[in-house]
């Protein structure tokens, strides 16, 4: 066996349990009839990831704030369509009831759950990636499990950072690296993806983008002018090679482009607690885990995950 330590696995928790909730039937219930489809799907997904990638460390990253004030201040429409009447996020009641169970199970397992007041899980992940990359010349490997394309901006082959992204019809996520980004989107890496996403916009997040500039045009402009800043500079320079139409579109969107990177770019320096997330052979609180397993009918899912963690550390 290699002496090289296993990867650091960062979980975009809400992305994973939302996906599990909608993918699995609500007939998956606890002994009292309470749905636990999101809990079981979340745990089973972690078990598969640990079995496949054998990480040395695992951290469950959390949305302490799903719609941070600094992003709303920059672009008021940010995630506005997801607001519930009470000002919180619109989430199915059957899923809301399962989140505390996930919290309890993670604590009993000993998998740290890290959030940061005023920040999204994306920012927690961005911060932990930045810390890991800064700590060593090249990370052994950092894997980010998420269903959110926004996190493609973290992909960095040289630093050892890749994204695992779920695909319909497959239990195994696809590995997103720079070659995949180049083939799929025609961009050169994670930062170029963020610049492309800023130009393109994202209706699912309430980001308008630049009118008339879609994915392919954005990627073409980035290949021509290098970065978002380069594109804006070229638009302002009437002697540049930018077409008149594209110049007008970029200049018309100057206000949006001045603030959009604040929204699109994940934080790299959020105040996130220090916790390595080292996997252990046995759960942090085996007795509590047994109680939770029986109470919520999670015996099989928890056994698979405990066995996977034991195998990864063995």
Image: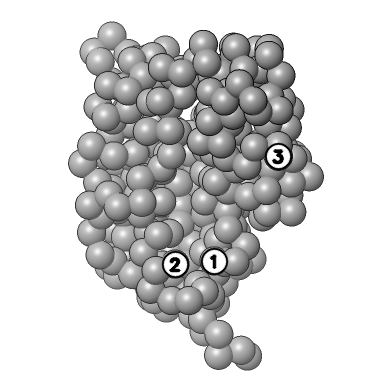
Dot placed on the residue nearer the N-terminal end, 2 or 1:
2
Q: Nearer the viewer, residue 38 or 229?
A: 229
Splitting the image into 4 quarters, where does residue 133 fall? bottom left
Name, please, the residue furthest toward the right: 183
Q: Secondary structure at mark 1?
A: loop
Can the viewer see residue 32? no
Q: Does residue 313 appear to the left or right of 200 in the view shown?
A: left
195, 178: nearer the viewer: 195
- Mark 2–mark 1 distance (CA, rounded to whole Å): 6 Å
Whether pointer 2 and pointer 1 mark residues with C-beta atoms closer than 8 Å, the reply is: yes
Residue drawn at point x = 53 percent, y = 28 percent: 232
- Give the residue number, with chain letter if any, for mark 1: 159
Q: From the viewer's perspective, is residue 71 above or below residue 118?
A: above
Please name whichever residue, 234 or 162, is drawn nearer the observer in this view of the structure.
Answer: 234
Q: Position of residue 50 (x, y in %)?
A: 55, 65
Nearest to the eye among marks 2 and 3: give it: 3
Against 229, is 115 above or below? below
Q: According to the image, label 3 marks what residue?
A: 223
Residue at position x 25%, y 54% in the image: 272
Q: Are marks 1 and 3 in contact (CB under 8 Å)?
A: no
The percent coordinates of residue 1 (x first, y second) are 63, 90
Residue appearing at x 35%, y 45% in the figure = 267
Q: Is residue 118 left or right of residue 258?
A: left
Task: Specify whether residue 282 is in view.
Answer: yes
Q: In the image, is residue 91 above or below residue 49?
A: above
Name the secondary structure under disc 3.
helix
Q: Position of residue 236 (x, y in %)?
A: 53, 23
Residue ID for mark 2? 133
């Amino acid at each position: 066996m290699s002496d090289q330590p296993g990867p650091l696995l960062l979980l975009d928790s809400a992305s994973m349990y939302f996906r599990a909730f909608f993918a699995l039937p609500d007939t998956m219930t606890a002994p009292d009839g309470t749905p636990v489809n999101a809990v079981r799907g979340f745990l089973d997904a972690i078990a598969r990831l640990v079995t496949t990638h054998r990480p040395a460390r695992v951290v469950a990253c959390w949305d302490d704030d799903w719609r941070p004030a600094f992003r709303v201040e920059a672009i008021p429409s940010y995630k506005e369509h997801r607001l519930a009447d009470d000002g919180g996020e619109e989430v199915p009641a059957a899923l809301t009831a399962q989140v505390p169970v996930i919290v309890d199970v993670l604590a009993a397992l000993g998998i740290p759950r890290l959030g940061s007041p005023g920040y999204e899980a994306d920012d927690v992940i961005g911060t932990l990636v930045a810390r890991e990359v800064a700590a060593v010349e090249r990370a052994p490997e950092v894997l980010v499990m998420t269903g959110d394309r926004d996190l493609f901006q973290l992909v960095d082959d040289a630093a050892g950072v890749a994204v695992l992204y779920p695909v319909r019809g497959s239990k195994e996520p696809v590995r997103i690296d720079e070659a995949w980004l180049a083939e799929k989107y025609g961009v050169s890496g994670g930062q170029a993806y963020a610049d492309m996403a800023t130009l393109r916009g994202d209706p699912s997040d309430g980001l308008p983008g630049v009118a008339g500039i879609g994915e392919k045009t954005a990627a073409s402009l980035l290949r021509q002018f290098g970065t978002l800043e380069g594109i804006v500079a070229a638009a302002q320079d009437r002697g540049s090679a930018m077409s008149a139409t594209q110049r007008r579109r970029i200049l018309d969107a100057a206000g949006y482009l001045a603030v959009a990177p604040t929204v699109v770019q994940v934080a790299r320096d959020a105040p996130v607690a220090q916790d390595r997330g080292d996997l252990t052979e046995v759960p942090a609180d085996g007795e509590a885990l047994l109680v939770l397993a029986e109470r919520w009918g999670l015996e099989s899912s928890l056994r698979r995950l405990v066995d996977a963690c034991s195998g990864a550390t063995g």
